[in-house]
Image (cartoon, grey):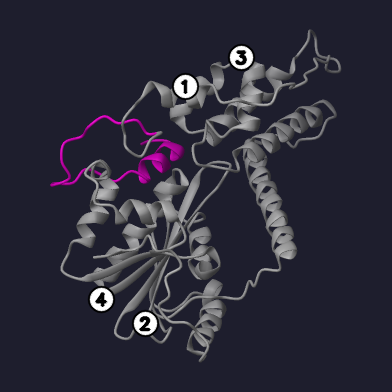
């Protein structure tokens, strides 16, 4: 009975469970959950470059004058785009800021989408597409459909970052070959990852379970809902651990390329335990089994990165893979061969911040 976009927001939230404890208020912008005025001031009064130049124009045969604020923020089409792209908790201040502050805050800081370093790029691209939509309308073409703006913006943001990554790799001469390593004898490895759209925050999670010879054991991909990247990464960890337990494995190496998520679940802080999802992960880790959690480089997590991106396109149901799906089968085979080579370093953690349970 609820609209699809609201269902997708609910999907990313862990439902009530016995034993989780009483609900407590917390501030979502800080991991600790505690609110401090100085933190709010740091967010709202961030130093930003000056000189955002604006100009008002008359539009064709329109009666009256339409300014740039109306085109980019307050018209129906613009509001439709921003309510999909900006977290609901930030929308009140997003739509109420003075227009010049609104432009500079979004272009030069990520305050409206915490943790999303791509937000400035995403915001600029969406503004350009909204402007283009208005021009197209005046000249008789029809490029202003909401879904078209969001999907095209998402593709353009991806193109920007792929181009930047390619240039960086070219300059630094980095070795981009797969570097997945096998777990120790008798253990299995669970790699997990998440993917979040910078346009509408749709999130997918994926995981792959392989044995000490690199053989595929199981895997999954699913749509997490609409949320930030950290929450999606934590869901990926939760689902990967739960799958490994349900399949009967009791010696598990869990790997993720999200250092922040690894540090959160490796901590035994009572404050972090107030998160229902983090608490659920902690309870999984405290079951009667052996789990090692470690951070790895992104290049070592290519299989689950592909699965997570696929999960963003799914409905509410998850997909379980008994055999490696086509989208990653080739890479799984390449990584298996590389891990069995004599020069392969086995079981080397790339970050000392991991944890053994």
Give neighbour class at mark 4: few <14, some 14-19, many 20+ (Cα, 10 Å).
some
Main SS of residues in magenta:
loop
At x 36%, y 54%, the residue is 263
Q: Looking at the image, can residue 347 be seen?
A: yes
Label 3 sits on residue: 98
Q: Over which residues does the magenta segment extend?
A: 1-28
In the image, is residue 348 above or below residue 64?
below
Label 2 sits on residue: 211
Q: Secondary structure at mark 3?
A: loop
- Of residues 60 and 155, the one nearer the viewer is 155
- Of residues 224 and 32, the one nearer the viewer is 32
In what quadrant of the picture does the C terminus appear? bottom left
How far is the residue under mark 4 from the one under mark 2? 10 Å
At x 51%, y 79%, the residue is 332
At x 63%, y 46%, the residue is 154
Dot 1 and dot 2 residues touching (CB under 8 Å): no
In what quadrant of the picture does the N terminus appear? top left
Q: Which callout, 1 or 2, points at the residue further toward the start of the chain? A: 1
Label 4 sits on residue: 249
């Amino acid at each position: 009975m609820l609209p699809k976009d609201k269902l997708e927001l609910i999907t990313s939230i862990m439902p009530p469970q016995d034993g989780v404890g009483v609900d407590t208020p917390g501030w979502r912008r800080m991991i600790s959950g505690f609110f401090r005025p100085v933190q709010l001031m740091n967010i709202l009064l961030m130093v930003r470059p000056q000189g955002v130049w604006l100009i008002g124009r008359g539009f064709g045969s329109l009666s009256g004058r339409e300014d740039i604020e109306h085109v980019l923020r307050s018209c129906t089409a613009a509001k439709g785009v921003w309510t999909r792209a900006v977290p609901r908790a930030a929308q009140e201040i997003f739509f109420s800021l003075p227009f010049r502050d609104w432009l500079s805050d979004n272009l030069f800081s990520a305050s409206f989408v915490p943790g999303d370093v791509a937000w400035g790029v995403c915001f600029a691209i969406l503004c350009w597409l909204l402007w283009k939509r208005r021009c197209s309308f005046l000249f008789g073409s029809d490029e202003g459909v909401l879904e078209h703006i969001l999907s095209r913006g998402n593709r353009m943001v991806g193109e920007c970052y792929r181009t930047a990554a390619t240039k960086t790799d070219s300059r630094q001469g980095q070795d981009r070959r797969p570097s997945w390593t096998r777990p120790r004898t008798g253990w299995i490895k669970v790699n997990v990852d998440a993917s979040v759209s910078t346009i509408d925050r749709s999130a997918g999670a994926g995981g792959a379970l392989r044995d000490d010879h690199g053989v595929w054991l199981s895997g999954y991909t699913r749509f997490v809902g609409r949320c930030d990247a950290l929450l999606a990464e934590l869901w990926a960890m939760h689902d990967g651990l739960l799958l490994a337990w349900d399949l009967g494995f009791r010696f598990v190496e869990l790997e993720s390329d999200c250092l922040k998520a690894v540090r959160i679940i490796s901590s035994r802080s009572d404050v972090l335990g107030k998160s229902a999802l983090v608490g659920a992960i902690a309870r999984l880790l405290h079951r009667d089994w052996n789990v090692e959690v470690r951070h790895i480089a992104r290049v070592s997590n290519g299989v689950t990165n592909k699965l997570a991106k696929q999960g963003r396109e799914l409905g509410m149901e998850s997909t379980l893979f008994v055999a490696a799906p086509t989208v990653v089968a080739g890479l799984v085979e390449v990584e298996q061969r590389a891990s069995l080579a004599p020069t392969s370093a086995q079981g080397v953690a790339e970050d000392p911040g991991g944890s053994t349970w």
